[in-house]
Image: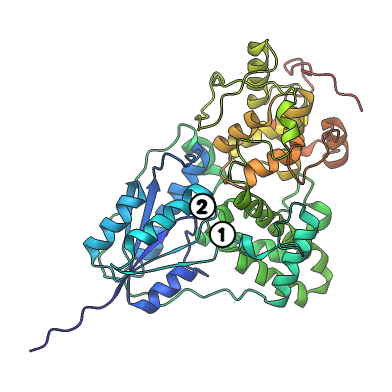
């Protein structure tokens, strides 16, 4: 009697693609046979560890993914450590005939993935798929075949590619699991997560899809183009953290927004203003792909001699964890003063209402309105003269949507040292920004209720209109 041939089994390694909808690697695995999921909280020496807020979001999202897969009889294995050891071991234990994942674009992780492909070659089929960006970084090039360094021509080229070949999002595949599932995972939370982040943040694919639907429906009532810069108005998509952890794909977001614009001409300008933000996100990853040390080195090298205040010493009370970077010597000998100024900025006690409102919103919610991010970044680097990396590291630890590309890219943009940056002499005057974008003080009063009382401090630096 001939034994039945075992059903092929595909091991799906989830990373920043914590969703079932429009997930190319999951669709491929479902067509291959039985599916088992794997998520690894990676510990790689060369890779920067997640900040505390983003790590909290990731854990909550993994918990939701575990439940979504379990409902379909698919087991999600959760491991901690080096994937170069874990993936081959799990694949061998399962007898996997295929291992598959969605691509990553940051050099330390690209190296890990390439090494794993070599290790697994000959033992099982290995595939990787696009899905984190609208266009692969190497596919959008200048006429001379070089990477773009300026957003406007990049955006035009990338948009043209998307119009010529519109993305087609994939539905949730019909999954065939092994039937074996496990209890929901439990994790240790950062000290402020339960009290603050959990009240304001709602990770997971279900919430991402709901938020996206609400955003599209709301375009008819609130003009994104006119209101997305006003921090007191809920006009933005709120999708940044969902996109960062792949709870919704940029392809689905682009395709459905573009279709919505075509069907509703009165909101077309608002829809395309939003899609431009997706192109900006892609551009940040395009630059990181070609500049792997974006988080630690000025893109414009002439800024290496710029007299920003800098210290390697950890800020008192900061949760920021150091990561590998060259030793830098503070330009200002009065190091303690700059550490004190940095701490006041972090706590939202600068005496500048819009700056303080933004920093308090960040600590309480794990996010900050994008217009205000520019204001607080400009204040730190240009009014206080503190190195942009101090701000970038604080955002890295406190933003739920901090990612390897957008966080350093945007800090270099506001500091003036990026290759498509606001000129250094451009300063986001916080008083003028308040007058223009929060004239009634609705946003500031929410976060700085004591602003008009003797309890509020005098401005750290005189700000002239």
Taking the spot 39% from the left edge, 75% from the top edge, the residue there is: 30
Decide which of 199, 292 is in the foreground and name it. 292
Question: x, y percentage for residue 425?
Answer: 86, 33
Report how far apart the C-alphas of labels 1 and 2 lie in the structure.
Answer: 7 Å
Left or right of residue 293, residue 268 in this image: right
Taking the spot 85% from the left edge, 30% from the top edge, the residue there is: 431
Q: Quadrant of the N terminus?
A: bottom left
Looking at the rendering, which quadrant does residue 383 occupy?
Answer: top right
Residue that lies at the very extreme toward the front in this rendered image: 144
Packing grade of label 2 (10 A; few <14, some 14-19, many >=20) is many
Looking at the rendering, which quadrant does residue 419 occupy?
Answer: top right
Left or right of residue 444, residue 295 in this image: left
Left or right of residue 41, residue 96 in this image: left
In the rendered image, is residue 304 in sight? yes
Q: Mark 1 points at which residue?
A: 208
Q: Do the residues labelled 1 and 2 touch (CB within 8 Å)?
A: no
Question: x, y percentage for residue 135?
Answer: 63, 65
Mark 1 or mark 2, earlier in chain: 2
Q: Residue 203, which numbered label?
A: 2
Looking at the rendering, which quadrant does residue 270 occupy?
Answer: bottom right
Q: Is residue 458 above or below residue 246?
A: above
Packing grade of label 1 (10 A; few <14, some 14-19, many >=20) is many
Q: In which quarter of the image is the C terminus?
A: top right
Question: x, y percentage for residue 21?
Answer: 51, 69
């Amino acid at each position: 009697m001939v034994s039945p041939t075992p059903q092929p089994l595909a091991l799906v390694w989830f990373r920043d693609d914590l969703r079932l909808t429009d997930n190319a690697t999951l669709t491929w695995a479902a067509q291959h046979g039985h599916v088992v999921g794997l998520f690894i909280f990676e510990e790689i020496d060369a890779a920067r560890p997640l900040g505390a807020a983003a790590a909290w979001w990731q854990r909550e999202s993994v918990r939701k993914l575990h439940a979504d897969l379990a409902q379909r009889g698919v087991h999600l294995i959760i491991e901690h450590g080096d994937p170069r050891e874990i993936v081959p071991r799990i694949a061998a234990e399962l007898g996997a005939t295929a291992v598959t994942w969605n691509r990553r674009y940051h050099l330390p992780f690209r190296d890990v993935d390439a090494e794993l492909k070599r290790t697994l070659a000959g033992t099982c089929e290995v595939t990787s798929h696009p899905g984190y960006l609208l266009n692969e970084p190497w596919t959008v090039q200048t006429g001379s075949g070089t990477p773009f360094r300026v957003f406007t021509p990049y955006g035009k080229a990338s948009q043209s590619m998307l119009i010529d070949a519109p993305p087609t999002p994939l539905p949730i595949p019909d999954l065939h699991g092994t039937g074996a599932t496990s209890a929901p995972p439990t994790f240790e939370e950062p000290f402020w997560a339960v009290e603050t982040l959990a009240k304001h943040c709602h990770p997971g694919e279900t919430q991402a899809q709901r938020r996206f639907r609400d955003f599209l429906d709301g375009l008819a009532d609130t003009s994104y183009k006119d209101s997305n810069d006003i921090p007191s108005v809920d006009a933005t998509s709120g999708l940044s953290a969902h996109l960062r952890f792949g709870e919704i794909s940029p392809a689905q977001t682009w395709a459905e927004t573009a279709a919505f614009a075509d069907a509703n001409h009165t909101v077309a300008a608002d829809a395309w203003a939003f899609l431009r933000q997706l192109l900006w996100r892609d551009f940040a990853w395009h630059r990181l792909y070609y500049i792997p040390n974006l988080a630690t080195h000025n893109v414009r090298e002439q800024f290496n001699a710029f007299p920003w205040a800098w210290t390697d010493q950890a800020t008192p009370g900061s949760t920021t964890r150091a990561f590998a970077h060259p030793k830098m010597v503070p330009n200002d000998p009065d190091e303690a003063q700059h550490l004190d100024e940095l701490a006041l900025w972090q706590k939202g006690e600068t005496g500048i209402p819009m700056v303080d409102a933004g920093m308090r919103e960040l600590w309480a919610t794990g996010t900050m309105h994008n217009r205000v991010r520019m204001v607080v970044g400009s204040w730190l680097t240009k009014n206080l003269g503190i190195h942009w990396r101090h701000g970038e590291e604080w955002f890295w630890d406190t933003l739920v949507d901090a990612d390897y590309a957008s966080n350093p890219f945007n800090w270099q943009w506001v500091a003036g040292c990026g290759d498509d940056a606001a000129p250094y002499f451009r300063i986001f005057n916080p008083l003028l920004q308040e007058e223009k974008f929060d004239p009634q003080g609705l946003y500031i009063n929410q976060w700085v209720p004591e602003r008009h009382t003797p309890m509020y401090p005098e401005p750290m630096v005189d700000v002239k209109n």
